[in-house]
Image: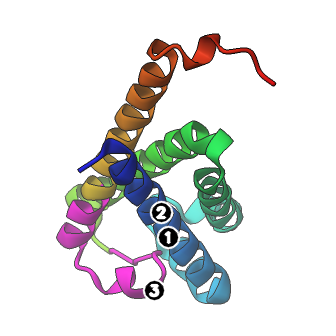
Amino acid sequence: MKSSFVLSFIRYALCFLFLYTSFNKLMAFDYYLYDLKRSPLLSNYAIIIAILVPGAELLVAALLLLEKTIRGGLLGSLGLMVLFTIYVGYVLLYAATRPCTCGGIIRNLTWPQHFVFNICFLLLSILGLYLQRRSLATYFHTGDAEKPLE
């Protein structure tokens, strides 16, 4: 399988994930905010998080769609997935109550399933960054970068 195909698959999978979750959060905003307010770690910042997270997800999705901003989208994806995974890990280990602030069908996952799901998308982000970097290195080593722009 060509790495460009795998990179495209990763980009679109991450883009779909972030579009799906952000739209679900925004469409059920009151419900999402209510769950954030019940969160053991996030309740003091619920309103700020309720706005920033879907906004960041939409921004990352847009960056993943544009050829010139793939790296930024993959870095944003990695950052979001690291934060989400740390949060889920914290809730699994330390929280007595576990309100789910996720959107859509992801809300139906158990917390351990959610942790595995996040790890998988975290690994996809890392693989995407690796493949994107490798494709850039290949581009610059083939001599294409030496050609003058017309």
Residue named by callout 2: 12
Q: Is residue 86 visible?
A: no
Main secondary structure found in the magenta portion: helix
**Residue lying furthest right in this view?**
150
Depth order, front residue of 8/120: 8
Residue drawn at (57%, 43%) of the image: 70
Q: Nearer the viewer, mark 1 or mark 2?
A: 2
Residue named by callout 3: 104
With respect to residue 107, does 83 lie above or below? above
Helix, strand or loop at disc 1? Answer: helix
Residue named by callout 1: 16
Residue drawn at (81%, 25%) of the image: 150
Q: CA distance from mark 1 to mark 2?
A: 6 Å
88 in the magenta segment: no
What is the magenta range?
A: 98-118
Q: CA distance from mark 3 to mark 1?
A: 12 Å
Residue drawn at (40%, 77%) of the image: 100
Q: Nearer the viewer, mark 3 or mark 1?
A: 1
What residue type is disc 2 on? Tyr
Q: Is residue 27 visible?
A: yes
Helix, strand or loop at disc 3? Answer: helix
Quarter of the rendering containing residue 89: bottom left
Disc 3 + disc 2, Cβ < 8 Å: no
Depth order, front residue of 48/147: 147
**Residue 143, image x, y percentages:** 52, 13
Q: CA distance from mark 3 to mark 2?
A: 18 Å
